[in-house]
Amino acid sequence: MFTTRHLWSFCLVFLSCVLLAACLSTDVKKVGRAGVDESNNGETDSDSLTITLAYRDDSADGRVVSLKGLTSLSSAKISNVCGLTGSNCTCKFYTSTADTAPVGTTAGTLSLSDTNNAVTCTIAGAVDPDDYSHMQLVTTDTSLRSTGFIEIKTNLEVKDVIGDLDDTKVTTISRYPCRYTFLEGEGVSPVGNSLSCVASQRLGTIGATYNYYLSSKGADGIDRPHGDVPFQDLVCKNGSLMNVSCQRNAVDKRYGLYTEAAFPFVRAVNLVAAPAGTNASPKIFGYAADPDSKGNCAPGLTKVQLWQATPQSIIQNSLPGGNNPPSNFVNTGNLDSFLLEAAQPANFVVDRQANSTTCAAVADSDGIFSCAAATFGALQPNVQSVTYLNTLQALCVIPKEVL
């Protein structure tokens, strides 16, 4: 009668420009040895790197600026120039390219992620970070090699986030809710989800909402929400109950993935698209990137985690008051709820409508104790309220704001 849905396993598989110039420039974003031939784009110069993005997130700490380098060339590693911790470099911030009095980096805030090929630093001083539109990455040795002025972005586009990858291979991941109706009553078997129509049955319902995911570039129907799922048979002649009701108009854009494995998007993400049918099994929706060893995502990417809520089975006399009939809300792992989100989701809630008018006390001409006239009491909205706990490794995904 019920399916094991969304209980999706995430098969998570492994997941600049700076040719060092001796002088400052307003158009070159490269740092490197003096005399380097810039035509090679750093492909053979072990001291070169390419800065592809400088980003300041206004929604978070508006003083922190992240620099992102190419990830496709080992010769473009920022650590080649700045050292593995970034201690050989500093950042300078300018109000314009004509500014001759830059502010520097707050002491101890410069951090380098070799995995992400990224540097973060904080605008120093009692200044308004919104006034600073450009920056430079500068070495701290006697050569004082520096990038040219790099414009600091506060709004990103998808190309800023994925670098030199093909933006047509980015898929938008959305989710939509489906409400499940479970049954309780004297004829409900906790095992096998079977139902018998018995005299004067107290037919009631237990409800919970689960979420499914869609891909804008998905094949086999995973680009559109599933329809409602009726009960296999009428519930003792009560035709008003639906096994699953999906809100097809409540599709919510969440984030983006890359549709194929291409560095840094190398970790496959498996999601479930529907409560029933062929798409009730996990499928690869795309690929995410891994955070670095400190748990940080590359600039522009958003960190998400898999969150799991595990509701308890509702069996006979298990609810407060101890007078509830048996139900088929029996959790053997198939009723756990999973969400892939940046922050801890609101609690998973199980509700209940107890029986108000019982099923028939006398069998009808078909020999069935009909529940057609059964009615339900007021909704009990929080029979269970279950906390989501994070599990498995974090992932770095494309934020929905750039899609």
Image (cartoon, rainbow, N blue to C red):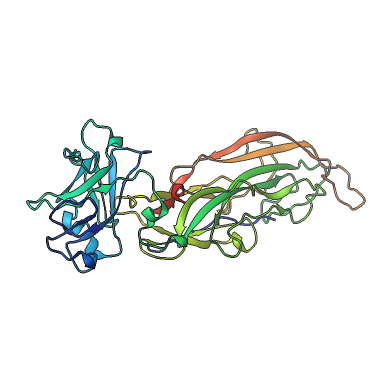
Residue at the limit of the structure toward the top, as seen here = 126
For image coordinates 28% across by 35% down, the residue present is: 131
The answer to which of 17 and 391 lies nearer the viewer is 17
Q: Where is residue 147 in the image (x, y as percent from the top left)?
A: 20, 52
Picture layout, residue 35 above or below residue 347? below
Q: Can residue 314 be seen in this view?
A: no
Is residue 260 rendered to the left or right of residue 196? left
Residue at the limit of the structure toward the right, as seen here = 365
If the image is split into quadrants, where does the N terminus sit?
A: bottom right
The answer to which of 385 and 256 lies nearer the viewer is 256
For image coordinates 64% across by 58% down, the residue present is: 276
User: Looking at the image, how many numbered discs can be counted on the residues?
Assistant: 0
Q: Position of residue 219 (x, y in %)?
A: 57, 64
For image coordinates 74% across by 56% down, the residue present is: 232
Picture layout, residue 225 above or below residue 327? below
The answer to which of 22 and 373 lies nearer the viewer is 22
Is residue 318 rendered to the left or right of residue 339? right
The answer to which of 240 and 325 lies nearer the viewer is 240
Q: Position of residue 106 (x, y in %)?
A: 20, 38
Q: Position of residue 46 (x, y in %)?
A: 18, 65
Q: Is residue 224 visible?
A: yes
Residue at the limit of the structure toward the left, as seen here = 142
